[in-house]
Amino acid sequence: MTRALVVVDVQNDFCPGGALAVAGGDEVARAISQLLARDTSGGRGIAYDHVVATQDFHIDPGAHFSDAPDFVDSWPPHCRAGSTGALLHDDLDTSRVEAVFRKGQYAAAYSGFEGVSTTVTAEGGELDTGLADWLRGHGVREVHVVGLATDHCVRATALDAVRAGFRTTVLLGLTAGISTATVQAALADLREHGVTLVGDPVLEG
Ligand code: VGL
Ligand code: ZN
């Protein structure tokens, strides 16, 4: 079954030192890089036929930004388009990332399925492709979701993946969350909606 790894929002602002740091975000970046390194050298065949990433990319996202954030629906300004904070973290190996799906330009967008990857056509125009269309176009039937933050963008992306008909697994060892209570709620929600949760990569099949 054609499988993709979806790397959610492993960006500087979600890592220690960033505007909306998630504890362990940089360790997640390194762990994902290690998974990808093992995936091409482990001698068990390649687990991921495709690798894509999502990127929180705010221009003017309205109430998503606040000077008095509640850290549930409003946040300190983060991942501003064009800023260093919006860049994918240096410890994330992006050599196998085939497309980056940007989201949240003018409103909150937690799910990578709200994002688009922009490419330039032969005629010089721009073509936006959503994540679901991209995955289907590449024959993907199954996704493994990793990244930041477990309780927000990973949760929303995995829920949309399963809704869109992809067999969906979240590799919890390659995620980090903002708060324990919302991570617990997210895990219950994911399980209930048919998302498989594993502590370690499941690479068979
Ligand atoms: C996220 C809060 C605000 C995330 C994005 O990537 O989980 N969280 N914007
Ligand atoms: Zn955001």
Image (tube, rainbow, N blue to C red):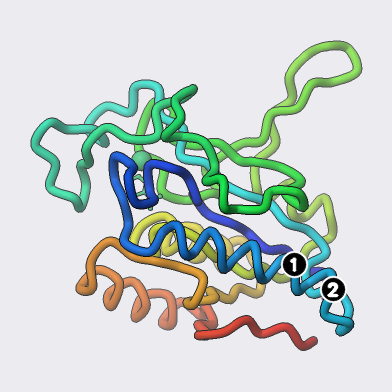
For disc 1, the marked residue is 37
The amino acid sitting under disc 1 is Ala
Categorize mark 1 by other alpha carbons within 10 Å: few (<14), some (14-19), many (20+). few
The label number, if any, that marks residue 80 in the structure image: none
The label number, if any, that marks residue 41 in the structure image: 2
Dots 2 and 1: beta carbons under 8 Å? yes
Q: Quadrant of the N terminus?
A: bottom right
Write the residue at 39% across / 59% down. 149
Where is 183 relative to 203, above or below? above
The amino acid sitting under disc 2 is Ser
Q: Is residue 26 left or right of residue 123?
A: left
Write the residue at 50% across / 37% down. 103
Residue 31: x %, y % from top left? 56, 68
Work out whether residue 75 or residue 128 is closer to the camera in this orientation and state it: 75
Write the residue at 46% across / 68% down. 175
Q: Quadrant of the C terminus?
A: bottom right
**Secondary element at tag 2:** helix
Work out whether residue 138 or residue 75 is closer to the camera in this orientation and state it: 75
Image quadrant of residue 79?
Answer: top left
Work out whether residue 158 or residue 45 is closer to the camera in this orientation and state it: 45
Distance from mark 1 CB to nearest ligand 1 atom below 8 Å: no
Q: CA distance from mark 2 to mark 1?
A: 6 Å
Q: Is residue 147 left or right of residue 142?
A: left
Distance from mark 2 CB to nearest ligand 1 atom below 8 Å: no
Write the residue at 45% across / 57% down. 26
